[in-house]
Image: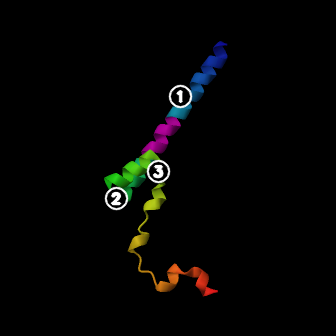
């Protein structure tokens, strides 16, 4: 039982370390992309992925861009 407990504890430690590393990378990427505080909070909560806040709204779209099925 001692070896099993040791391995279980080791696995939990590794998982916690991986979670911290992922969170650190996520924070760095959010800072690099200059997200607003509300965007960062939504990403942290898991409501949105980091790529949901791309600058697609800054692009100029033609009328045809809205109706792709009409292009057939």
Q: Name the residue under label 1.
A: 13
Q: Name the residue under label 3.
A: 47
- Return the x and y of residue 11 as percentages of the image width and height: 59, 28
- Return the x and y of residue 42 as percentages of the image width and height: 41, 51
Q: Give the numbered dot on residue 34.
A: 2
Q: Is the magenta stretch mostly helix, strand or loop?
A: helix
Q: Give the numbered dot on residue 58.
A: none
- Return the x and y of residue 6 as percentages of the image width and height: 61, 19
3D distance between C-alphas at marks 3 and 2? 18 Å
What kind of element bears circle 3? loop
Residue occupying image coordinates x 49% and y 44% = 22
* Front in this rendered view, residue 50 or 29: 50
* Image quarter (top left, top right, bottom left or bottom right) of the C terminus: bottom right
- Read off the magenta span: 17-24
Residue occupying image coordinates x 38% and y 73% = 58
**Direction left: furthest residue:** 37
Q: Would you call the spot at circle 1 few (<14 residues within 10 Å), some (14-19), or many (20 or more)?
A: few
Q: Hey, which quadrant is residue 7 in on the image?
A: top right
- Numbered label tally: 3
15 in the magenta segment: no
Q: Hey, which quadrant is residue 39 in on the image?
A: bottom left
Q: Nearer the viewer, mark 3 or mark 2?
A: 3
């Amino acid at each position: 039982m001692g070896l099993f407990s040791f391995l279980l504890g080791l696995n939990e430690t590794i998982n916690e370390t991986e979670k911290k590393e992922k969170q650190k990378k996520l924070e760095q990427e959010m800072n690099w992309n200059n997200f607003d505080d509300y965007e960062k909070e939504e990403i942290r909560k898991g409501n949105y992925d980091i790529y949901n806040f791309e600058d697609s709204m800054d692009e100029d779209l033609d009328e045809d861009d809205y109706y792709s099925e009409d292009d057939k």
